[in-house]
Image (cartoon, rainbow, N blue to C red):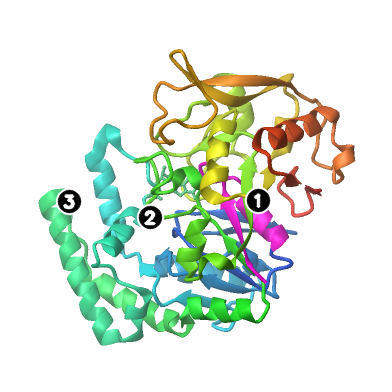
C-alpha cells in the first residue's frame, strides 16, 4: 500500500484536520512530516474538541500509529503537554503508538526568543510568524548547528549541546538584538527532564515507515500549513521555513518517490491567510466579516495557534492551479462550503490582469503578486443551509455548480465536501 498525502492547497487552515479524520479510518499509520507547533489542527469527536499542534490528528482513531517525521521541528515542552492533554481525553499515547524521528530537530526556548527578537527587529517588514521558534529552529538545522531529537539519547552529550546552543542564543540576543538573555541553567534542567520522557519514543521512523509499506500498510501523511507557505514555493518571504508541499512528505518521512499514492489537496471554499504577505483576492468590510465569522465558534476564521483574525477573500483559482502543479494533487477535498450559504452571488478568481496582460497561471511564482488584479467569474449563490446535507444530489443546484465550476477550472475531481465542523458533516462523491 502507498503513502497517501494530504496537503493544504492555500495558506494553511484549509481544514486538513477534518479530512485527515475521515481518511485516517482506512490508514494504519498517520504521520506529520513538516513544521512544528505553528500548526493547529482542530478535530472534533463527539463531545471532545482536540487542538493538536504536533501529534498527527489521525491518532484520535485508536487503531492508528502516529509518526513525527524527520522533517519536523519539535518543541519537547509543547509535545509533552499535548500528550497529557490527549491522554486526559482518553486517547492512548505510549511508545508503541507514537514514534518520534531521531532526526527531527528540537525547538528550544532559545529559538522562540530569537523568533520574537527577529520579528521585533524587522518592524513594519515583519513576517507575522506564530512566534513558535520555527524559523530559527530550521535556521539551526540548515546551518548545521541544530540539535536533533537523537541528542536526547545521551544526557551528558545533550546537556553540553544545549549549553553551547544557549550560549550562542544569548550572545545574539544581547549583541544583535539588545534583548535580555535567557536563564540557561533553568532551561537545561527542564530539558533534561523532557529528554527522559521523550527518550522511549525516539525511533528511526523512516525505517519503520518503509517496513510498514512493504508489509502492505497504508500511511497517511498529514500536511501542516499550506502550499503558499512553503519555503520554496510560497509567497516568499512571507512563508514558513519548511516544505509543507506534498514532495516534503517524502523527504520529511524518509521515503522514496515511488512510495507516493493519492495526493489530496485540501481547498477551503474561499481564501484565508494569517500573517503578512500578498493576497490578491482579499476582501474587507461586510463581505469579509461574513466569511470570517465572529470568533464565537471554533470553526470561525481565527487562528488555532495564535487566535489572530484571519484575512479572507474569494477563492483564487490561479493560485490553486499552481498548487496542483507543485504538489501533484490528484483530487480535492473542499471544506467550509456551508459558509458560502446566504450570498446572492459568489466570485471566483480565474485569472490575473497586470497592465494589458492577462494570466491564467503565475508568470513569476506567488512571490511576485504585486500589481496583479483578479479577473473574476461570477456564480449564483444559494440561500439554504447546507449543514445537514449528506448527499451530493441534495445540495442546491448553485452549490453543485460552484463545485463543478471548480472541477472544470482545475481538471481534478472534488471527492470530499465538508459542510460543518462535526465529523459527520461531510458529503462524499
Ligand atoms: P512561522 O511558521 O511561525 O515562522 O510563520 C510564518 C508564516 O506562516 C506566518 O505568516 C504564519 O502566520 C504562517 N503560518 C505558520 N503556520 C501556520 C498554520 O498552521 N496555518 C496558517 N498559517 C501559518
User: From where the camera sits, is residue 48 visible?
Assistant: no
Disc on the earlier residue, 1 or 2: 2
Mark 2 neighbour density, 10 Å: few (under 14) some (14–19) many (20 or more): many
Of the residues tagged 1 and 3, which is closer to the observer?
A: 1
Is the distance from the Cβ of mark 2 to the nearest ligand 1 atom less than 8 Å?
yes
Real-space Cα separation, disc 3 to disc 2, in angstroms: 18 Å
**In terms of depth relative to the viewer, which is nearer, 242 or 154?**
242
Of the residues tagged 1 and 2, which is closer to the observer?
A: 1
User: From where the camera sits, is residue 94 visible?
Assistant: yes
**In terms of depth relative to the viewer, which is nearer, 298 or 332?**
332
Q: Which mark is residue 330?
A: 1
SS state under label 3 = loop
Q: Is residue 185 above or below residue 284?
A: below
Disc on the earlier residue, 3 or 2: 2
Left or right of 251? Residue 269 is right
Q: Which mark is residue 100?
A: none
The spot of residue 124 in percent (x, y) is 28, 32
Q: Residue 283 appears in which quarter of the rendering?
A: top right
Left or right of 101? Residue 113 is left
The spot of residue 217 in percent (x, y) is 67, 76
Mark 1 neighbour density, 10 Å: few (under 14) some (14–19) many (20 or more): some
Kindly identify the residue that appears in the image at 37 percent across and 75 percent down: 149
Q: What residue is shown with label 2?
A: 132
**In terms of depth relative to the viewer, which is nearer, 102 or 128?**
102
Q: Residue 278 appears in which quarter of the rendering?
A: top left
Mark 3 neighbour density, 10 Å: few (under 14) some (14–19) many (20 or more): some
> Which residues are the magenta region?
1-23
SS state under label 2 = loop
Q: What residue is shown with label 3?
A: 179
Amino acid at each position: 500500500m502507498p503513502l497517501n498525502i494530504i496537503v493544504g492547497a492555500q495558506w494553511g487552515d484549509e481544514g486538513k484536520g477534518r479530512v485527515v479524520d475521515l481518511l485516517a479510518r482506512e490508514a494504519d499509520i498517520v504521520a506529520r512530516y513538516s513544521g512544528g507547533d505553528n500548526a493547529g489542527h482542530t478535530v472534533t469527536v463527539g463531545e471532545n474538541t482536540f487542538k493538536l499542534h504536533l501529534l498527527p490528528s489521525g491518532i484520535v482513531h485508536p487503531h492508528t500509529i502516529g509518526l513525527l517525521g524527520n522533517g519536523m521541528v519539535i518543541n519537547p515542552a509543547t509535545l509533552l503537554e499535548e500528550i497529557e492533554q490527549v491522554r486526559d481525553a482518553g486517547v492512548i499515547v505510549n511508545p508503541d503508538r507514537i514514534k518520534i524521528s531521531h532526526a527531527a530537530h528540537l525547538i528550544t526556548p532559545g529559538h522562540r526568543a530569537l523568533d520574537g527578537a527577529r520579528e521585533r527587529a524587522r518592524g513594519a517588514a515583519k513576517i507575522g510568524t506564530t512566534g513558535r521558534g520555527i524559523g530559527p529552529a530550521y535556521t539551526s538545522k540548515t546551518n548545521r548547528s541544530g540539535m536533533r531529537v537523537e541528542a536526547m539519547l545521551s544526557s551528558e552529550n545533550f546537556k553540553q549541546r544545549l549549553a553551547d546552543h544557549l550560549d550562542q542564543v544569548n550572545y545574539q540576543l544581547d549583541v544583535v538584538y539588545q534583548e535580555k538573555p535567557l536563564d540557561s541553567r533553568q532551561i537545561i534542567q527542564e530539558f533534561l527532564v523532557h529528554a527522559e520522557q521523550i527518550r522511549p519514543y525516539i525511533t528511526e521512523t523512516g525505517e519503520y515507515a518503509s517496513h510498514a509499506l512493504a508489509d502492505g500498510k497504508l500511511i497517511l501523511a498529514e500536511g501542516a500549513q499550506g502550499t503558499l507557505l512553503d519555503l520554496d514555493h510560497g509567497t516568499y518571504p512571507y512563508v514558513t521555513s519548511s516544505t509543507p508541499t506534498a514532495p516534503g512528505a517524502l523527504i520529511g518521512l524518509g521515503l522514496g518517490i515511488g512510495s507516493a499514492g493519492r495526493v489530496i489537496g485540501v481547498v477551503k471554499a474561499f481564501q484565508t491567510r494569517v500573517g503578512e504577505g500578498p493576497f490578491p483576492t482579499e476582501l474587507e468590510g461586510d463581505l469579509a466579516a461574513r466569511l470570517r465569522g465572529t470568533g464565537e465558534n471554533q470553526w470561525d476564521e481565527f487562528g488555532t495557534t495564535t487566535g489572530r483574525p484571519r484575512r479572507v477573500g474569494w477563492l483564487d483559482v490561479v493560485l490553486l492551479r499552481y498548487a496542483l502543479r507543485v504538489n501533484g494533487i490528484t483530487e480535492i477535498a473542499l471544506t467550509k462550503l456551508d459558509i458560502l450559504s446566504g450570498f446572492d452571488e459568489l466570485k471566483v478568481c480565474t485569472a490575473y490582469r497586470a497592465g494589458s496582460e492577462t494570466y491564467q497561471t503565475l508568470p513569476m511564482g506567488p512571490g511576485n503578486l504585486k500589481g496583479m488584479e483578479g479577473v473574476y467569474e461570477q456564480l449564483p449563490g444559494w440561500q439554504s443551509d447546507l449543514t445537514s446535507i449528506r448527499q451530493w444530489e441534495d445540495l442546491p443546484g448553485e452549490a453543485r455548480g460552484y463545485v463543478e465550476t471548480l472541477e472544470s477550472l482545475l481538471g481534478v475531481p472534488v471527492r470530499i465536501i465538508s459542510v460543518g465542523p462535526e465529523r459527520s458533516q461531510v458529503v462524499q462523491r
